[in-house]
Amino acid sequence: MENKIKITGESWAALNMQLSDILIQHAFLNEKLNSTFPSIETIYHYTSLSGLISIIENQTLFCTNINYLNDKKEFCYGVGLILKVLEKLKKEDFEISVLEMIENHIDHIYKEERYVTCFSKDGDLLSQWRAYANQGKGVSIGFDFFKLDKSIDQPLHGKHIDYDENSQYQTVEELIRIIITFFKERKNIIDWEDFGYEWLVNTVIIDFLQGIIASYKSSSFKEEQEYRFEYTIDGNMVKKEDEEIHFRASETLIIPYIILEAKYRRFQKNKKMGKYNECAEEPFFVLKRLPIKEIIIGPSLDFDTIKSGLEELLFKHEYKDVLIKKSNIPYRI
């Protein structure tokens, strides 16, 4: 026992670093872990006219608690996928004790609070006009994909949404196999006594998979072509008391959300509050406004009338070279 490695903060961090290196190697070499997505330059946020005005005037976006999105099975879908994989691996008699530990503690996957802002890779979809842009009486805002997350003050994780159930299943299965095999190979050289082998392996798998399944949705939503930014309150790097939670009401729900604020707006606000010296120079590397490239006016609006007011709004807030387009959908919703 004395020759075994004791689990300390330092040794555990080193072990997880080794695991990360192995997972990165597999990500490049293992076909089951390779999900490919088309390159994109613009992502579109569907919203009402009042939502558009708020985004431009305040230089902010709303980030909604994932449990209150239109897809009520949003995160449960991925958990269901994990449980299916666990059943398959148990039938193979693959490390049953670890798999059962994961099953018994699968609810821990919900412990982090996740907030998301959703976009589409297509700026002119009938389903999106109906669902998110006031039945077509709104707009689709096209943001520069490469600049948007860099312009936001909070740390965000960008995610392409995967709708391929076979690919999702293979990825979850392969990751569980790789992680369990990694720890199994080191089981006899580590002193697990104070923590428990099954418990720690279960914790690593759940912590890892909760980030993966956040990008999984049912194929029935494939038309959305979604890309999203996720902000996570994990209790460690980001604590709940450090982030102000706001609330808005739908017809049937009280919905928690946070406000994603442009870095330049946050700088200006902090300067006014005296957090910076009055002579503090503006950060030259920060965009002065959210990177809007184009705005598509919904199919249920009078294009010319809305365009005129929109041009005034953009001019007032110093937006230049924003392309204003009309929806190609020949349909008034």
Image (spheres, grey):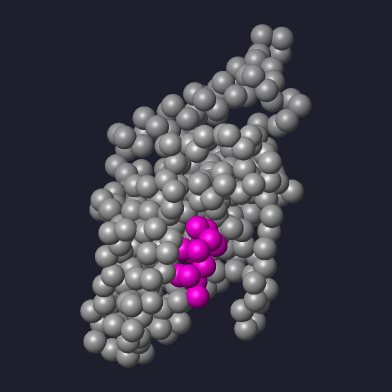
Taking the view exactly as shown, the residue that stands out farthest to the top is 3
Q: Give the magenta-colored segment's residue range.
A: 50-62
Residue 317 at x, y percent in the picture: 43, 61
- Left or right of 225? Residue 110 is right
Taking the view exactly as shown, the residue that stands out farthest to the right is 194
Residue 52 in magenta? yes
- Left or right of 70? Residue 236 is right
Residue 93 in magenta? no
Residue drawn 61% across the image and 79% down it: 250
The part of the image, by quadrant, that contains residue 13 is top right
Whether residue 82 is visible = no
Residue 260 at x, y percent in the picture: 55, 54
Q: Quadrant of the N terminus?
A: top right
**Above-or-below relation of 71 to 330:** above
The part of the image, by quadrant, that contains residue 245 is bottom right
Residue 231 at x, y percent in the picture: 55, 51
Residue drawn 38% across the image and 77% down it: 309
Residue drawn 64% across the image and 54% down it: 113
Residue drawn 36% across the image and 43% down it: 33
